[in-house]
Image (cartoon, rainbow, N blue to C red):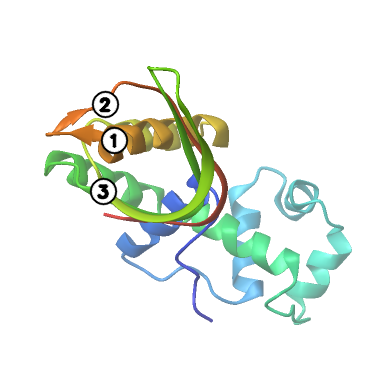
Amino acid sequence: MAITLYANTVEEALDRADSRHWTRPAPRSTRARLHFLARQRDGGLPALAAYLGTGENTLNQLLTGHRLPPEDSLHQVLEREVIRLWQPRIRRRAHHTILDNGGMMTVSFRAWFGFTSAAGSTDDPRLRFLTLSLRDPYPKHLFAARHRQAPEDELNRILSEALAACYFQRNGVPAALEEVTLKEIDYLEFYY
């Protein structure tokens, strides 16, 4: 089973980009994922069932060999949680290495992207597909926010600021913008 490398939230996209730096493969079977996730929670399987919003009996059935179809929402939640929690030290080490070497980060996205300029003119958000290189200090801000488990709104705001700094510039100088909005993300992928 292949892990999808793109997402529709900033949090998940950062986690999926981190998966390219793993030194060992993450658990792939449902049973292995459940064992790993249960060890991550105080209270084991009952606490995991409560966190996932499912019954403990469902998780016990999965541990005894019952299979989930790949399109099942529980299967997708388990995959997302494993990606979020797998090899945290490797993730932090990769982030430090990236930042120590110039902090290059590329983002590709398809989303409703709009802006408001300082002169008062506005642009209604349009569906755009863009690939941009984010400059310092934005990769650092994204990593720091992700390490402290910042909410999706904050991550989206940081990414919007970064996009404003790189997309709207004239002769290398960022344009004066009041706000950039990134809404209804359909596809988001980071490369670093």
SS type, badge 3: strand
The residue identified by callout 1 is 168
The residue identified by callout 2 is 175
Q: CA distance from mark 3 to mark 2?
A: 21 Å
Number of numbered callouts drawn: 3
Three-letter code for the amino acid on which mark 2 is drawn: Ala
Asked if disc 2 and disc 1 are in contact, CB closer than 8 Å, the reply is yes
Quadrant occupied by the C terminus: bottom left
Where does the image place residue 145, in percent across and percent down from the top left?
A: 42, 31
How crowded pointer 1 is (Cα within 10 Å; few <14, some 14-19, many 20+) is rated as some
Where does the image place residue 87, in percent across and percent down from the top left?
A: 40, 55
Q: CA distance from mark 2 to mark 1?
A: 6 Å
Mark identifier at residue 105: 3
Q: Nearer the viewer, mark 3 or mark 2?
A: 2
Asked if disc 3 and disc 1 are in contact, CB closer than 8 Å, the reply is no
Q: Earlier in the sequence, mark 2 or mark 1?
A: 1
Q: Which of 82/80 is in front? A: 80
Q: Earlier in the sequence, mark 3 or mark 2?
A: 3
Asked if disc 3 and disc 2 are in contact, CB closer than 8 Å, the reply is no
Residue 30 vs 152, above or below: the answer is: below
Three-letter code for the amino acid on which mark 3 is drawn: Met
Residue 41 vs 55, above or below: the answer is: above
Q: CA distance from mark 3 to mark 1?
A: 17 Å
**Residue at the image position 52 percent from the left and 70 percent from the top:** 27
Q: Earlier in the sequence, mark 3 or mark 1?
A: 3
Where does the image place residue 55, in percent across and percent down from the top left?
A: 87, 58
Three-letter code for the amino acid on which mark 1 is drawn: Phe
SS type, badge 2: loop
Q: Which of 136/147 is in front? A: 136
